[in-house]
Structure formats: structure tokens, C-alpha cells
Image (cartoon, grey):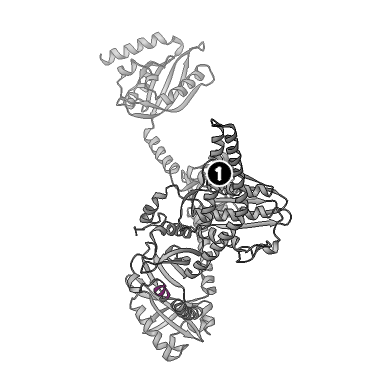
């Protein structure tokens, strides 16, 4: 299609859509439209292109024919379409005569371009909307600059606040919002002075610099939360058309830096005070012209040595110390100046002993200064001398004591023994040191492990009676005290044992025990004779009945058998108590032991009008003990309770487990024991009974102590007495004793089998 045909077509289209009253010079309008420097378009009321010029085609990239076949909505960026349509609605409704907006078009290549759009509405003489005339300018370059500028402001890590010439805020970037806690809209058009903390005249510092000079200063602002923030700020004038219309305040938050500086100043002052008030002494020196000159000297020790900082600083040693002392110290100074680390020496001035540590300060590998710290060790030197004397005294005590002392590590290897150990056990030091200890019998290894566990858990082991072996295999009764040896960190690294040979004493106690047993047997004899006489009488009566009534009296046999069993039990228990036996420790049921003793003493209790009540758990309580000794203890306690109630009464026997200990409690409501006599109970031949020997209760204490238990006696006159026995709870697997010995104590790391 040639040019004349295009013009004719345009004229025809325009004639169809425009009324003759438009009165437009077609030729002039076409020329102005087609050759305008900006994009021009005629758009119908539905948004379709009616006419476009060359500039518009160049801006958008589409040809005229391509544009005339579409509408402007299809080229508009979706984010701008709604606003554009709203403007068009207001234009058509008569609210506006024209409108201008910035919007985005899609170029034919797919890229987004920014345009400045100016739209006017053309109406008929009757006022009816006909079409719109659009003027379109490409502003993509300007928008890119604006975006870069906005990015520079928005993403700048420095806080930026823009002010007008009156000091009102007209913009904050996000960094400034974060610094002061306000959002931009909260401060818009308010005076910058309103957020200045302290002197409000700080704003004039910036305003006075609007002649182009950028000023750096520190300002304090009030944060939205009320606290102060400090800014290091400078101003930058805002210049439009060569005229300053405002200025930017570009700032960074120096609050933490300021606090750090203030803290540093405080620390420096504190350091100075610490150096001045320290109990020791700190000094520094440099080599100047071949002489060691002191550059610092301070601390309490300076004055105690009879010196002052003024006498030392700026001077060398010979100027305030005798020449011979100065000469010795200069040798140490020389070593430190040559680069040797940690040069130590002791000195003494005015009867004060001190130790100095010299350390070189290097820069680029060269010593530039030496710093020294000194502490007063006068008391320590005295303590060391006292400690040495104490050590010598202790060594003499250990060497000459009559008690055997041995030290073993946690693997039971002997570290040290004294002369008494060699004498008592027959081993020389060379035979045992560095080797596993050899004096513990096999049947005492479980006991030893338990003692170790108690010791490591913090319990005290004092005067514990046990058995050890002589070199020749002879058993020795000893009283053992063991204690932990700990290192500086408080960890147990070894065990010290002190043992005393009590074999002769044990023999004496055994004689006393036999005497007490005979006494018990004698006291039991009357009650047992009466008890045996009762079933014998029954047996005699039944035999007479059977003789009179003839044979086939079977129903009497069961009764007679029970009576005979009763006699047999009483005689057997009586023999157990009376007959000396070898002391053997085995696992026994405490419940059964108690019931057996109660059954034995029941006749005597009945004769004295005493009732015995027993309270125990259904499950058996197991203890590791000697049966004969434990029965002897129970018999003594129950007999004492029976004899304490002359007019009859009740004895309560309770057995229970509490905190891994077995408790046996015997309570009577007898005459009671005076408070002043309680402390003497258990002593040999001390008794509260008219015909007593005092041996029974003494043996009870000894037996329970040998079983690693305790006895507590509480009593009130006319109210009664309570005896509480506490014993260790036996292990459930007695067969594992040897295995536990081999595995040693689990709680101690690094243990190896012995």
C-alpha cells in the first residue's frame, strides 16, 4: 500500500468516527501526528489503537499494522493495568479532562520499558466521548537512574535522613529507620530537632555547613524506645538547578563504639588502679644507651620494699639498690633482654623475700621492652620451712609408730610401708612395694571391696575390726583405719591404711564372750527346764491314757510327735548357744533368725507375763552375718527387755530396710534407763541390773561393730527403752564376690584385676 492510499484510508476511518463539527485541519494534524518527536496515538474508548505514529512504533518495537490489530491493555504491565483503567474511568466520567502517569509497556522483544503517558479525551460538540489522544515518552533511562539512586539510598548500610531547609524530615532510608527505631512515615514533615537528645543546637552545625562544606560530627538521637543512640554523621547538600534545597544527614551508629571507648577508658583506669593497688609489684624496663632504665614500677610491694615509683622510674638498678645486689639482678635483666622467656629469680630487700618473673616484649622479632611481675613469698618461704619440719616430723612418726601403715594405689599395688608393717606382717618393704597387696585373706576380699566403695563415697572407716594374714599364713585380728589420699584436684589417687594388731585383745574378748554365753545359758536353764517339763508331762499323760484305753489311739500320736519336736527344737537351740563354734559369715534371713530367737524365749516371756509382737516384711531380708553371734545379740536384747518389765508388758520387734541399711528395732515399755547411764552402756562389767555382769551388752556392741553395723539406745524413765540396730544390706548374688574382687571397683577409672 503506497503513501496516498494510507492517507486515504486514514481519512476514511477518521470520517467514519469523527463528526464534521470537529473542525480539524486534516493535513496539519496528520503532519504533526506522524512526525512528532514523542509517541502519539489515537485510542478508541475500548482501548484499541486507531492511529499510531512512527515514534510510538520505535518506542514499543511493533509496526503500525501490528499495533492497529491489538489494544494498549495487552501491552501494559499487569501491575500498572488497574491504575491505568481507573484513570480512564475517571476521564470518561468527566472527573478529569486529562491525566498523566508513569507506567510500563512490554517491548516487542519482551523487555519492560517505562513510559510517561499523557492522555486527553476528545468529545463531540454534544459532549459525547469520541476517542482519546495519548502522548507517550520513553523514560526508561531516567527510571533506571532513579532505581539506581533509590537503590543507593535504600540499600546503603549508612543511615540517611533527608531534610528540607527548615530542618524538617522528608525521608529516611531503612538503615536510619533501624538505627532510631522509627519508620519514615512516623517522622515525615516533623522537625529533626524533635529526635535530637541533649543540645538541640546540634542541627545548626549541619545547616551552617550548607555552603558546600561537608561536616563530620557526633550527634545523639533519642530512639523510639527512649534510649539514646550516638551517630557519627556528615551532611551532604541537596542541589537542584544549582540551588541548595535541603541536605542529607549520612550517619553510622557509633553507640557500641562509644560504649566500647568508655568501657576501655574505665578498663584503663581500672588497670591502673589494679597495678597500683595489687599486693605484688609490676615493673618494666628498656635498654637505653647500654643501661637498663625502668619505665614503670607500681604496686603495694614497691612500698613494702622501702621504695617508691618515683625512685625507680627513669633510673637503673644501681641508683636505688646496693651495687652488689644490682649486679646480680642485671644478669637476669640481660637474659630477658636477649629474648629468654620466663626468667625467674628470688630477691630479698628489707627482710622481704619476693620472686620476679621477667618476660620480653617483642615487635618484629626484636625485644623492645621487658615486663616483670613480682610477688611477696615471705610467708610462703616460712610455710615451706614449716612444712619441711612437719614432713620430717611425720616421717619420724610413721617410721617409729607401733601401728602398721601401708599406702596402696587404686589397683591395690603397695606404694609404701613402715617398719611396724614389716614387724607385724613379716614382709620386708622390698617384698611388697610395687606389688599387689598380699595380706588380705580370700574370704575378706568382698569385705575389702565394700570398704573401698564406702570410702570413695565419702564415708569414714575408723577402727574397723577384721582379719589379715601374716607372711607365714597365720591370721591376725587387726583394728583397721583407712583414709583416702587426694591430689590437688580433689581426686582420690591412693589409700592409706593404719592397722593395729588386736589378736590378744580378741582372745580376751572371746573369753568374755564365753563367760557371757555361759551366763546366758544359766539364765535360760530355768525357763527351758519348765518349758521341757510341760511337753514331757503331756507325753506322760497321753501314755497313761493309751495304756488304760488300749491300742488304736492314733489321734494321740500327732500331738505327741509335735511335743517331741518342740523338745528337740528347744534342746538344739540351747546347744547352739552353749556350744563354742567357729565364726563363719554366710547369707541368712533376718526374718528367720528373729522368729527362731523369739520362739526360744517365748516360754520365759510367758512366765514373766510379757507379750512379744513382731512386725516384718513378707519378703525375706537377707544379711551377711554369723548366725550364732547374731542370735546371741537378739537373745541378750530380748532378755534385757523381758527383765526390764517386772510387772509384765509388751515387746515390739520391727525389721525393715531403709536407705540400703537393714534396721532391727526392739522396743519395751519397762522401767527405762536414766539418761546419765546411757553413755556407759556397752562398757565391760557396767550394768544396771542387780546381778548382771555387763558383758552381754558389751558383746552385742562388739558383734554388731564386727558386722559393720551400729547400735543406738534411747530410753526414758518409766516409759521404756528402744534399741535400734543398723546393718548393711547383703548383696543378692553372694556367688559373685570373687568376680567383683577380680573386677575391682567399677567407680574408679583405670582399675585392673588384682
Q: Nearer the viewer, residue 483 or 515?
A: 515
Q: Is residue 732 left or right of residue 141?
A: right
Q: In the displayed structure, would residue 396 be above or below residue 750?
A: below
Q: Is residue 610 left or right of residue 70?
A: right
The answer to whether residue 343 is magenta is: no
Tell me the residue at 42%/48% (across/down): 733
Q: Give the x, y percent position of residue 476.
A: 43, 67
Residue 487 in view (yes/no): no
Label 1 crowd (10 A; few <14 / some 14-19 / many >=20): some
Q: Give the x, y percent position of residue 629.
A: 52, 56
Q: In the displayed structure, would residue 131 be above or below residue 542?
A: above
Q: In the displayed structure, would residue 546 be above or below residue 654?
A: above
Split into 4 quadrants, where in the image is the C terminus? bottom left
Dot 1 corresponds to which residue?
566
Quarter of the rendering containing residue 11: top left
Q: How many marks?
A: 1
Split into 4 quadrants, where in the image is the N terminus? top left
Q: Residue furthest bottom?
A: 323
Tell me the residue at 48%/42% (across/down): 174
Q: Is residue 222 left or right of residue 211?
A: right
Kind of element beneath mark 1: helix
Residue 534 in view (yes/no): yes
Q: Give the x, y percent position of residue 534.
A: 62, 44
Q: Residue furthest left?
A: 1
**What segment is highlighted magenta in the picture?**
420-424
Q: Nearer the viewer, residue 116 or 578?
A: 578
Q: Nearer the viewer, residue 116 or 360?
A: 360
Q: Label the magenta part by its dominant secondary structure.
A: helix
Q: Is residue 206 left or right of residue 609?
A: left
Q: Give the x, y percent position of residue 386.
A: 49, 80
Amino acid at each position: 500500500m503506497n503513501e496516498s492510499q494510507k492517507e486515504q484510508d486514514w481519512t476514511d476511518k477518521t470520517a467514519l468516527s469523527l463528526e464534521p463539527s470537529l473542525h480539524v485541519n486534516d493535513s496539519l494534524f496528520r503532519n504533526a501526528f506522524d512526525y512528532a518527536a514523542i509517541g502519539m496515538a489515537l485510542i478508541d474508548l475500548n482501548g484499541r489503537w486507531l492511529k499510531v505514529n512512527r515514534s510510538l512504533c520505535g518506542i514499543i518495537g511493533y509496526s503500525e499494522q501490528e499495533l492497529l490489530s491489538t489494544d494498549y491493555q495487552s501491552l501494559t504491565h499487569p501491575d500498572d493495568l488497574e491504575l491505568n483503567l481507573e484513570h480512564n474511568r475517571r476521564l470518561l466520567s468527566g472527573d478529569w479532562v486529562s491525566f498523566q502517569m508513569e507506567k510500563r509497556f512490554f517491548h516487542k522483544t519482551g523487555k519492560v520499558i517505562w513510559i510517561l503517558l499523557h492522555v486527553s479525551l476528545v468529545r463531540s460538540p454534544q459532549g459525547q466521548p469520541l476517542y482519546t489522544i495519548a502522548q507517550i515518552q520513553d523514560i526508561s533511562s531516567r527510571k533506571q537512574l532513579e532505581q539506581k539512586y533509590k537503590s543507593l539510598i535504600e540499600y546503603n548500610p549508612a543511615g540517611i535522613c533527608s531534610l528540607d531547609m527548615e530542618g524538617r524530615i522528608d525521608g529516611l532510608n531503612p538503615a536510619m529507620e533501624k538505627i532510631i527505631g522509627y519508620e519514615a512515615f512516623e517522622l515525615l514533615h516533623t522537625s529533626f530537632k524533635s529526635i535530637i537528645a541533649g543540645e538541640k543546637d546540634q542541627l545548626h552545625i549541619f545547616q551552617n555547613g550548607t555552603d558546600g562544606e561537608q561536616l563530620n560530627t557526633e550527634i545523639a538521637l533519642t530512639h523510639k524506645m527512649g534510649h539514646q543512640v550516638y551517630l557519627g554523621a556528615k551532611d551532604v547538600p541537596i542541589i537542584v538547578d544549582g540551588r541548595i534545597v535541603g541536605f542529607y544527614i549520612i550517619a553510622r551508629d557509633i553507640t557500641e563504639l562509644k560504649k566500647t571507648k568508655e568501657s576501655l577508658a574505665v578498663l584503663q583506669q581500672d588497670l591502673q588502679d589494679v597495678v597500683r593497688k595489687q599486693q605484688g609489684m609490676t615493673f618494666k624496663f628498656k635498654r637505653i644507651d647500654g643501661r637498663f632504665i625502668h619505665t614503670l614500677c607500681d604496686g603495694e610491694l614497691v612500698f613494702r620494699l622501702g621504695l617508691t615509683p618515683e625512685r625507680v622510674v627513669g633510673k637503673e638498678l644501681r641508683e636505688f639498690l646496693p651495687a652488689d645486689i644490682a649486679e646480680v639482678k642485671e644478669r637476669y635483666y640481660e637474659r630477658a633482654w636477649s629474648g629468654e622467656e620466663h626468667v625467674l629469680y628470688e630477691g630479698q630487700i628489707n627482710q622481704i623475700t619476693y620472686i620476679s618473673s621477667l618476660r620480653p616484649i617483642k615487635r618484629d622479632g626484636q625485644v623492645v621492652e621487658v615486663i616483670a611481675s613480682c610477688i611477696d613469698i615471705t610467708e610462703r618461704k616460712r610455710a615451706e620451712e614449716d612444712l619441711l619440719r612437719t614432713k620430717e616430723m611425720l616421717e619420724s612418726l610413721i617410721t617409729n609408730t607401733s601401728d602398721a601403715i601401708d599406702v596402696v594405689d587404686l589397683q591395690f599395688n603397695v606404694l609404701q610401708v613402715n617398719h611396724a608393717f614389716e614387724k607385724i606382717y613379716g614382709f620386708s618393704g622390698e617384698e611388697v612395694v610395687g606389688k599387689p597387696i598380699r595380706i588380705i585373706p580370700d574370704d575378706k576380699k568382698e569385705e575389702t571391696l565394700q570398704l573401698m566403695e564406702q570410702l570413695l563415697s565419702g564415708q569414714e572407716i575408723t577402727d574397723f575390726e577384721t582379719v589379715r594374714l601374716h607372711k607365714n599364713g597365720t591370721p591376725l585380728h587387726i583394728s583397721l583405719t583407712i583414709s583416702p589420699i587426694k591430689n590437688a584436684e580433689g581426686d582420690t589417687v591412693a589409700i592409706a591404711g593404719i592397722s593395729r594388731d588386736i589378736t590378744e585383745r580378741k582372745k580376751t574378748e572371746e573369753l568374755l564372750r564365753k563367760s557371757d554365753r555361759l551366763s546366758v545359758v544359766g539364765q535360760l536353764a530355768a525357763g527351758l527346764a519348765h518349758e521341757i517339763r510341760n511337753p514331757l508331762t503331756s507325753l506322760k499323760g497321753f501314755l497313761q491314757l493309751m495304756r488304760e484305753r488300749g491300742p488304736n489311739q492314733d489321734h494321740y500320736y500327732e500331738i505327741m510327735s509335735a511335743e517331741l519336736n518342740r523338745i528337740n527344737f528347744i534342746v538344739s537351740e540351747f546347744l547352739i548357744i552353749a556350744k563354742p563354734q567357729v565364726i563363719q559369715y554366710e547369707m541368712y534371713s533376718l526374718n528367720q533368725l528373729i522368729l527362731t530367737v523369739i520362739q526360744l524365749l517365748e516360754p520365759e516371756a510367758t512366765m514373766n507375763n510379757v507379750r512379744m509382737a513382731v512386725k516384718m516384711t513378707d519378703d525375706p531380708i537377707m544379711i551377711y552375718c554369723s548366725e550364732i553371734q547374731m542370735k546371741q545379740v537378739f537373745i541378750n536384747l530380748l532378755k534385757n527387755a523381758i527383765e526390764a518389765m517386772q510387772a509384765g508388758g509388751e515387746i515390739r520387734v520391727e525389721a525393715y530396710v531403709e536407705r540400703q541399711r537393714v534396721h532391727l528395732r526392739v522396743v519395751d515399755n519397762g522401767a527405762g534407763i536414766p539418761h546419765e547411764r546411757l553413755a556407759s552402756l556397752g562398757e565391760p562389767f557396767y550394768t544396771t541390773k542387780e546381778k548382771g555382769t555387763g558383758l552381754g551388752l558389751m558383746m552385742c556392741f562388739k558383734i554388731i561393730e564386727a558386722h559393720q553395723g551400729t547400735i543406738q539406745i534411747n530410753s526414758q524413765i518409766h516409759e521404756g527403752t528402744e534399741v535400734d540396730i543398723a546393718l548393711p544390706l547383703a548383696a543378692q548374688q553372694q556367688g559373685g564376690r570373687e568376680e567383683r574382687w577380680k573386677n575391682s571397683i567399677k567407680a574408679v577409672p583405670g582399675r585392673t584385676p588384682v
